[in-house]
Image (cartoon, rainbow, N blue to C red):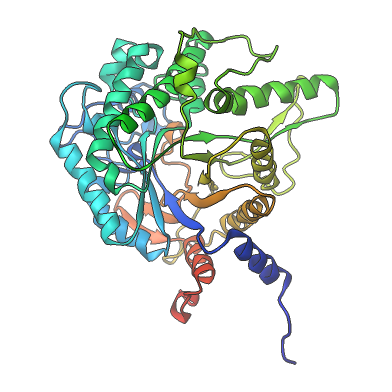
Amino acid sequence: MKKTGLSVEEMNEAQMQSALGPEFVWGVATSAYQIEGAASEDGRGESIWDVFSRQSGKVLNGDSGQTACNHYHLWKEDLDLIKGLGVDAYRFSFAWPRVQPQGRGALNPKGLDFYERLIDGMLERGLQPHGTLYHWDLPQHLQEEGGWGLRTTAEHFANYAEVIGRKFGDRLTSLATHNEPWCTAVLGNLTGKFAPGYRDPQLAAQVSHHLLLSHGLAVKAMRAAGVRTQFGIVLNQSSVSAATDSAHDRAKAQTEYCSFVRWFMDPIFRGVYPQDPGIAHYPDIRAGDMEVIHTPIDFLGINYYTRIWASASQPEVPPPKVLGESDMGWEIYPDGLFELLKDVNRDYKLPPVFITENGMACVDVLRDGKVEDQARIEYLRMHLQSVANARQAGVDIRGYFYWSLMDNFEWESGYAKRFGLVHVDYSTQKRTLKRSAHWYREMIGRHKGEVSMGHKNA
């Protein structure tokens, strides 16, 4: 019998493709410390993660980014791999200590040359370069002076941003100031899970303010210098669900949303910090700071992995995890991405939005040259549907970057967690496309109407 019509899965994808539109940007993302390696080569200075990783018990198995994926030497092969995925864009980060080893003062010509080659290599392959100035690798020299707890670090960051902007801005499609300042402030200075490993709630609040201040100062400095690219910031965000309908759980949910989402969104888009009785620590603010932070931006990057499940009870009521969880132990909740996007679009006057990170850590096994990661494919499918739903609801989402291109150094988890579309054998540095990489390529090809039979059978 001749097949008529579309299956439910095909109909969903057809609707999704239509909702995303022909100009939608497809990409993959990485960060410098997680993939570059060459941590002691060509004049690179030490970062806080180099030092943190050497401290006993801070990183699983004593791992570090000393070699990582050796991208510093294998960048040509990696760009060819990215091009082969059929994506439009590559999101990467500059390593501040590679460009400016002390975080201020003298520049490192070899570090600048590396990014020159990398960016030109993207352009030669038809890839849009989307840069990030800071993905958590503060030069150790600045940390020893006080790190992000000092206002002067924000000023040094603005100078560094101007250097990058002047040098590369004409070739960058976009440039984000920070990736996930919440992680730097909270995981690095409140819980101690990330570098530099402090546990000081007042310091964490002040660090968050200096990060936001540095963002505003950097955008102003680059615009004043005539840098011509799109400026923005990348924030990790989540929807928040109260575990029950009790007043305590609803209040807990409100506080969680304030401290995770609104703490950064309100200063950037409203010029104020949110007030909530559950937030105990606020930063010291100088006159004019909020105006600087409120500097208009050209785009907002949103990173989403899971929702926040808010419970005021002891012990906390666990989330239901109906769709399971990732290897990070995070609940798989794609509806949360739609809920988040709908809410922030309602509450703020947003510039164009990019989903700059979204992905899943799986227990990937390389067997007979293949990695069959069907769970990651389902994760991707469901979250892309949420993006499409949000676009249909009026959110101006311009693109999606999967995290991450390849398995890499996953911070305090070392090399134990794998988020990549591409499997990396760390002993040989061999790259192997997982089944999800083939699926992503095919899906993008269908979106562009360019899938060949060869790709379908890859």
Residue in the image at 57% along x and 38% along y: 350
From the top left corner, tell me how far across and down residue 240 is, in percent. Answer: 70, 32
- In the rendered view of the protein, which quadrant contains the C terminus? bottom left
Figure quadrant of residue 72: top left
Percent across and percent down for residue 219 are 38, 30
Specify the quadrant of the image occupied by residue 195. top left
Q: Position of residue 30 (x, y in %)?
A: 39, 45
At horizontal 67% and vertical 65% (from top left) the residue drawn is 15
How many numbered circles are shown?
Answer: 0
Residue situated in front as seen by the camera: 312 or 250: 250
Residue drawn at the location 55% of the way across and 21% of the way down: 271
- Picture quarter with the N terminus: bottom right
Observer able to see residue 292: yes
Q: Position of residue 202 (x, y in %)?
A: 52, 8
Residue at x 32%, y 24% (from the top left corner): 157
Left or right: 316, with 345 as reference point = right
